[in-house]
Amino acid sequence: MRLSSVGLAGVLAVVLGSCSGGSTSSNTVPAVSLGAQAPVSAAVNPAPLNVIPEAVSVNAAVNLTLQARFNAENRPSFFWNGQEVAPTIRVRPGDTINLTFVNALPEFCSVGIETDANLHFHGMHSSPIPPGDNVITTKAAPGGSTGYVIHVNPDQPPGLYWYHAHVHGLSAWEVGNGLAGAIVVEGIGNYVPQTAGLRERVIVLRDPPISSSFLAGEQSVLRRTGTVTPSATARKPLDADSTGGNACSPETDMTPTINGARLASIGIRPGETELIRVVNAASHRHFDLTVDGQQLQLVSQDGVPVSMYPGEPAMIPVSDIIIPPAGRAEFLLTGSRVPAALISKCFGSGPVGNNDPEVALGVFTDDSHWPSHSTEKTQSERHVARLASVRRSPFFNSRMPAPVQERIVHFQEDPTGNYLYLNGQQYNANAPSMFTAHSGTTEEWTLENDTEEVHVFHIHQVHFIVESVNGVPNPSPHWLDTIDLASTGIGVAGQIIPSQTKVLIDFRDPVIRGTFVFHCHILDHEDHGMMAKITVL
Amino acid sequence: MRCHIALIALAAVLWSGAASAGERVTGIVLMAPSAGTVVIHHAPFGGMPAMTMTFRVPAQTRLQPGDRIAAEVDRTTDPWSLADVRVVTAAKVTPAVAEPPIARVGDWVADVPFVDQRGHAMSLRALRGAPFAVSFIYTRCTDPHMCPLVSAKFHALQQRLPGRASLVEVSLDPAFDQPRVLARYGAAFGADPHRWHLLTGDPRTVLDFAAHFGILEEAQGPVKIVHSERLAIVDADGRIVRFFDDARWSPGDVLAALATAQYMVQKQP
């Protein structure tokens, strides 16, 4: 861009307003509740972890009305029963979710987009046909509403799922700012006896952008993909510069939150083991969770107990758990007498992706001596139940038969990072499906990442297992619905080598018929084209 | 034997002295459970892995959970103490004041309220359904390489616009460029108000819009505005499909870009 004169001293430092033309104020997600600059001489502790209100099914159904509208900070938010909250929906296999979705967002953003909104029930094996879990045609225009009837599959594995907005072009902004909540399918105690009777805790991690404006919501990742050209980026190791300025320096444009707070104290009694259920509801951020190097016992990923896949153990001991955007992890943690930090370690997302810096999310503290009101707020009263109704699934509890079809999906982007593609195509709701599969079968897909940043594969309606990554067989296959695809590597001759992840996808359940989507769950990538349709006949 | 013990004691004294002298630690403050103590998740230092520890701090130290700090460690106390505590990043996240988000190819063009040269309220959304070119001028501009050149080329474009494509010029001097002023300026370049929209409006809104396109402007004196120049092609859906930086674009290239965008409209079912 040429300037008409040299010596331009001032640059307008303005940020485009948010949808209501309102402020570009800082993120005012409820944060640590402290007085300003409280001296250390008084005890200064983070506020107790917020307990998320729940909509619980009664007589095999849960009925709720969710309203999407701007909160006081001009951020798209859910309101339920007059309260600004995305409730956790708690159901049992076989139940029905009757959800009325009201879109009360302002009609247009300042960027001129009609603020449609809808919902996806992530990980749920239910029909993609309206009024079910359909994101292709079902949406509510501003001022309108739509209804969802989700029949929770009787074979739905007991675990943690989530619901979130899924309008192509708007999803990063809507989800990033808060249009997302957790779903718990009860009964994990049946599959993982070690969890039965344990206190359980639902944790929703988000990464709202600092500015509420649409552009901030969508551009956080555009900056990642767009401003760094591969040639300009030296492949430097993470933590190369511990003095700041590198990818692992503190967050600048996002503020990760844990149940709505930036940092929370999580009361856990010494020696008591809890089931910690974490959903990554961020629009694009990875969380790599660790609790002070303690061994965590991973019992479930993406809603499905690890042990449901034949031959897999009930628990996998790990030192840290990488949860990609949209992923879930459930693990056991035992309290200790000394405080232990819940940290998300720096996550490297490839040479042209920005990395997610280290962040402290919480501190597990011995609250057995705290005043009772604190304990009340910080202790979850939920305990894992065993259900009589949970049955063995003919699908999840069986090894998958050989695939009837092999396919390849290339994850691609143009050099500017503005356009993203699957197999060279950008998403078009009106185009025919990229693939047609047949119900009752399984398929092997090779997910090839041709770019220099991590992408996150997610397919609606079904789960899959990872067979191999870059030719190395997966020693511990278990059910997932969301998986990281590593960025390209460099061969010995300097050639670029795409990464290849082979997955075996399960289309056996007859409930799963119709047209749905698969996409990159870094939602800015999805908004910019990295999504396609599949029809299951 | 006594000699050995003395040596070990000496070694211990030397070691502890060496370890504590100027040893710095960085970490994140998690909590301050009581007066003069903080719990910190620290980075590896002095042979210790990253972990959560309680430290003593001087009573007057002001820290908040979430602060990232750097401090000097004294291992001679129990628990260890921190001195020279500096907050590297305060917990309270302040809004990034840095750069405005600059529009990129693929972004939707901002839909802000304008007023055109006829004094009619207008938003760019009204132009949906056909592509348009948008650029930036101010009527008092005298630099022949900038605004007048852009408007002269717009005149050439107007004669050959494909389909319902249109032209938009946004004022960088909205306080002065009232609709009457814009109408005079438009007339001088033969602007047809139905196809060539000269826009002004609330100064802050209009200049924010320009900044969003990466237009830098600064008033130098009452009349002169130094600014950068750029032209964007916006498609029928309101998405930016192409930029032409500075004012040296050729009308042929811009027409070709508009025609391509127009062709995409016709191709859609």
Image: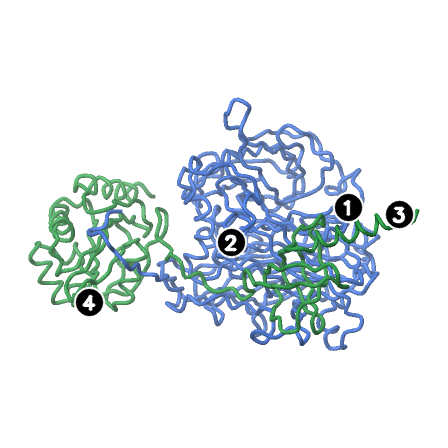
Chain colours: A blue, B green
Front-lying residue, B62 or A49: B62
Front-lying residue, B156 or A506: B156
Q: Which residue is mark 2?
A: A166
Q: Relative to A242, is B205 on the left or the right?
A: left
Question: Which amino acid type is shown beneath numbered disc 2?
Answer: His
Q: Which residue is mark 1?
A: A317
- Looking at the rendered image, the disc whose residue lies closer to the viewer, 3 or 1, is 3
Question: For the residues marked 3 and 2, what is the alpha-carbon distance in whole angstroms?
Answer: 76 Å
Whichever of callouts 1 and 2 sits on the residue coming sooner in the sequence is: 2
Q: Have a look at marks 4 and 1 and say if they share a chain.
A: no
Question: For the residues marked 4 and 2, what is the alpha-carbon distance in whole angstroms?
Answer: 37 Å
Which chain's residue wears label 4?
B
Front-lying residue, B44 or A320: B44
Which label is found at residue B223? none
Whichever of callouts 3 and 4 sits on the residue coming sooner in the sequence is: 3
Q: Which residue is mark 4?
A: B120
Which label is found at residue B3? 3
Question: Which amino acid type is shown beneath numbered disc 1?
Answer: Pro
Question: For the residues marked 1 and 2, what is the alpha-carbon distance in whole angstroms?
Answer: 34 Å
Crowding at dot 4, Cα within 10 Å, few <14 / some 14-19 / many 20+, comes out as few
Determine whether the residue tagged by mark 3 lies in a helix, strand or loop. helix
Question: For the residues marked 3 and 4, what is the alpha-carbon distance in whole angstroms?
Answer: 99 Å
- Looking at the rendered image, the disc whose residue lies closer to the viewer, 1 or 2, is 1
Residue A248, image x, y percentages: 56, 49
Residue B203, image x, y percentages: 25, 67
Which chain's residue wears label 2?
A
Crowding at dot 1, Cα within 10 Å, few <14 / some 14-19 / many 20+, comes out as few
Tell me whether circle 3 and circle 4 mark residues in contact (CB < 8 Å). Answer: no
Q: Relative to A296, is B189 on the left or the right?
A: left
Relative to A214, does residue B176 appear above or below in the rendering? Answer: below
Relative to B112, does residue A445 appear above or below in the rendering? Answer: above
